[in-house]
């Protein structure tokens, strides 16, 4: 059995104060990968105290020259790039995804640090006019100590998406990776240490949500919580943080529509739509899991999607041939399988269901093959986020109808639209209540852009310059010149 890892608090590698540990497993085999400290309230206390001291005592934040913060982030970007292969393999072992996808994640992690390293020197305020006898300065300041709670589907990328803008703005952070996938967060701490991030600025507390995450929500030393994960935990976080009016950013789930119009380039639409729901094993908050298809191309699209699903190769993510890995945990497999099992009784028609891998070494892996249902928008399969490779395909006839169906959901994270008619594409894009709309594509999320949900998909925005706002306060300084 593999390593005993430590977590990173106040510039030191430490065990949990309680001495407790837990095991991170490889979801392709069910085998143990490493033991990790099982952090709790005492460890959060130490981490928040360290982050508070680093912020208030001037080893980061407004007391450090922006260009110095910038250079440290550039160094982190470079170190991630140098360790690209190793980090990607670690990610595959911990969460299951195919290696090509993991390499893509790690490349984006590196770019994320580069991108926000650039922003560190370019955040500026404003000077609104207030007449001849006065001057007003609006200055931007870091919000303070940030508790960053991240999920297991893109472990290092989701961590970087919060850590990079937080550090760029001058915040100090306590990162709580998901209990299913703590390994790359610990590597990020090593990289931060090597890059010269001062002690206390970047802390990682590993452990379970209720033990290592929840204490940050009520800790008076934490100014801001940024969370990506389930709607259930997100709403609880919002409610809990209200007591101290902590700033909150939430990136939650989705049940995103993927609309294929009759005039679409069908080869591209079919491939893109299939990958939009099956990519990353369907463990994607923005997965295009409701696939609306114009009746005139419905049979062709359904057949095409089935062909793509049948061509997917399930296996270990380390095998370069693999295009779909296992789900992250036995629990997640059981949740997804329960939706599949209940589908027919709820009125869905099972069109395709793939096979588990045959390799006996993977017999205990948490695989769920790609599954396609014909559905209506009313049934549970089309309403609840499944977070697995399950497509609900739904026919439509009219534009107004598909817009209405697309918006008939409590969520509003993303939407994909496939058509050659630019007017139709943009009219539809404007009508869909979602934070991200793709036209003739599905799922790209470059760091320079913007990400976030309408409705119950979240609060606030990430990526691009929008993420900076999540980690900044604005201060007005008014000067009487008379
Ligand atoms: P999932 O159910 O798919 O694991 P969660 O929303 O529970 O999704 O998990 C996302 C992140 O939120 C993880 O890091 C998890 O540990 C954390 N988390 C879960 N429960 C809590 C909680 N009660 N307080 C704070 N963080 C939590
Ligand atoms: Mg794991």
Image (tube, rainbow, N blue to C red):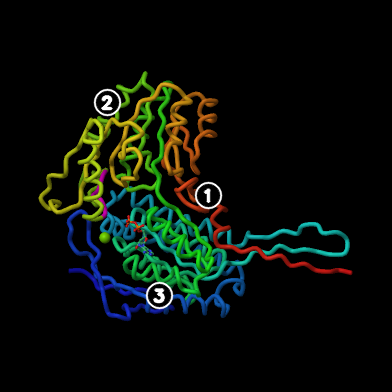
Q: Nearer the viewer, residue 119 or 206?
A: 206
Q: Secondary structure at mark 1?
A: loop
Residue at horizontal 35 percent and vertical 21 percent from the top: 297
- In this rendering, position of residue 474 left or right of residue 357: right
Residue at horizontal 45 percent and vertical 41 percent from the top: 414
Question: Where's residue 191, x and y in %?
Answer: 41, 68
Which residue is denoted by mark 2 in the rendering? Answer: 303
3D distance between C-alphas at marks 2 and 3? 52 Å
**Ligand 2: image quarter:** bottom left
* Numbered-mark total: 3
Task: Tell me, yes or no, whether the highlighted magenta stretch contains residue 477.
Answer: no
Q: Is residue 4 above or below residue 317?
A: below
Q: Secondary structure at mark 3?
A: helix
Specify the quadrant of the image occupied by residue 299: top left
Q: Secondary structure at mark 2?
A: helix
Give the number of the mark in front: 1 or 3.
Answer: 3
- Answer whether labels 2 and 3 touch (C-beta < 8 Å): no
Which residue is denoted by mark 1 in the rendering? Answer: 448
In the rendered structure, find residue 44 and report the number of the disc placed on it.
3
**Residue range highlighted in magenta:** 324-328
């Amino acid at each position: 059995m593999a390593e005993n890892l430590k977590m990173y608090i106040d510039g030191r590698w430490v065990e949990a104060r309680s001495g407790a540990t837990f095991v991170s497993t490889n979801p392709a085999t069910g085998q143990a990968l490493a033991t990790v400290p099982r952090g709790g309230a005492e460890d959060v206390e130490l981490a928040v105290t360290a982050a508070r001291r680093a912020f208030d005592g001037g080893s980061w934040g407004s007391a450090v020259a922006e260009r110095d913060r910038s250079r440290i982030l550039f160094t982190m970007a470079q170190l991630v790039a140098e360790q690209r292969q190793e980090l990607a393999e670690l990610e595959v072992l911990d969460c299951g995804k195919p290696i090509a996808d993991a390499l893509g994640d790690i490349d984006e992690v590196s770019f994320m640090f580069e991108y926000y390293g650039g922003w560190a020197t370019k955040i500026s305020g404003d000077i609104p006019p207030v007449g001849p006898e006065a001057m007003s300065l609006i200055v931007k300041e870091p919000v303070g100590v940030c508790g960053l709670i991240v999920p297991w589907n893109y472990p290092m990328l989701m961590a970087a998406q919060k850590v990079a803008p937080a550090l760029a703005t001058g915040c100090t952070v306590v990162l709580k990776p998901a209990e299913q996938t703590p390994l790359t967060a610990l590597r990020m701490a090593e990289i931060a240490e090597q890059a010269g991030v001062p002690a206390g600025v970047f802390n990682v507390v590993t452990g379970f949500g209720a033990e290592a995450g929840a204490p940050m929500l009520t800790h008076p030393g934490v100014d801001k919580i940024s969370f990506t994960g389930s709607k259930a935990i997100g709403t609880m976080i919002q409610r809990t943080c209200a007591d101290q009016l902590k700033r909150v950013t939430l990136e939650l789930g989705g049940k995103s529509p993927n609309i294929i119009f009759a005039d679409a380039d069908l080869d591209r639409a079919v491939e893109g739509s299939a990958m939009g729901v099956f990519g990353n094993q369907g463990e994607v908050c923005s997965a295009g899991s409701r696939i609306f298809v114009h009746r005139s191309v419905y049979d062709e699209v359904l057949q095409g999607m089935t062909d793509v699903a049948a061509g997917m190769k399930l296996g270990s993510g380390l095998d370069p041939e693999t295009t779909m890995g296992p789900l992250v945990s036995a629990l997640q497999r059981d949740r997804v399988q329960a939706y599949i099992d209940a589908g027919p009784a709820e009125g869905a028609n099972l069109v395709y269901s793939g096979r588990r891998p045959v390799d006996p070494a993977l017999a205990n892996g948490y695989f769920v093959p790609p599954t396609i249902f014909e559905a209506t928008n009313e049934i549970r399969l089309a309403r609840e986020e499944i977070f697995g490779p399950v497509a609900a395909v739904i026919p439509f006839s009219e534009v107004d109808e598909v817009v209405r169906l697309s918006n008939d959901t409590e969520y509003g994270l993303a939407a994909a639209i496939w058509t050659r008619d630019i007017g139709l594409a943009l009219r539809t894009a404007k009508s869909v209540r979602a934070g991200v709309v793709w036209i003739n594509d599905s799922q790209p999320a470059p760091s320079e852009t913007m990400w976030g949900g309408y409705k119950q998909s979240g609060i606030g925005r990430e990526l691009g310059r929008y993420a900076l706002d999540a980690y900044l306060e604005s201060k007005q300084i008014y000067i009487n010149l008379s």
